[in-house]
Image: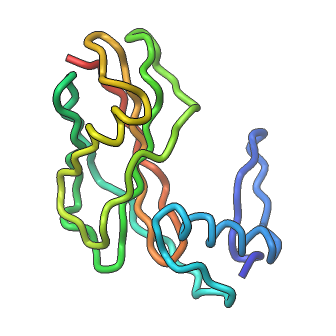
Amino acid sequence: MGLSMSRTDSLGQTYSLNGFQAYCSVNNILAVTGGTLISDAPVLSTPVGLLTMTLTLSSVAFSVAYTTTPLAAATKLIIRCSPQRSAGRNFEADYRVIATTAAAAASPANILTPFTAKFGVPVTGNKVFVSASTMFGGFESIPLIVGQVVV
């Protein structure tokens, strides 16, 4: 299975995973989403990513509305957020898992409580970046990334 899974490094070069790397990749995603870890290789699948994502972000509300909703059966959404940044920032590389939805969850996902627990209350004028990807069977889609200033 590892040879079927490819990644791109920071220099833009594509490489295939070996068996151990594939095992770790699948089980890390399952662990993040609360799934049962596996020892046998699953069938390789590529989940369909989100089509759109809209944030509602203030000091008293933080939710992520997305399409397609609800998610497909057995598909979960992994939501990662950045720490609060200057409003002028346009690029972010520091994302942390904030929440994982239940399988086949419907939009929107309310993430104010977990975000506040990790980064504090959103401050008006700061910018937060959100990266959301779908997960199916230990495989993760390409993330959809949105940044928004707290109003």
- Residue 145 in the image, given as x and y percentages of width and height: 41, 39
Q: Is residue 91 above or below residue 55?
A: above
Side of 126 relative to 2 (left or right):
left
- Direction bottom: furthest residue: 40
Residue drawn at point x = 48 percent, y = 61 percent: 141
Q: Is residue 8 above or below residue 121?
A: below
Residue drawn at point x = 75 percent, y = 40 percent: 10
Residue drawn at point x = 20 percent, y = 47 percent: 65
Side of 71 relative to 100 (left or right):
left
In the rendered image, which quarter contains the C terminus? top left
- Direction front: furthest residue: 117
- Residue 101 in the image, given as x and y percentages of width and height: 32, 61
- Residue 150 in the image, given as x and y percentages of width and height: 26, 19
Residue drawn at point x = 52 percent, y = 37 percent: 95
In the rendered image, which quarter contains the N terminus? bottom right
Nearest the viewer among 26 and 11 is 26
Colour scheme shown: rainbow
Side of 127 relative to 44 (left or right):
left
Which quadrant holds residue 22?
bottom right
Q: Is residue 121 above or below residue 88?
A: below
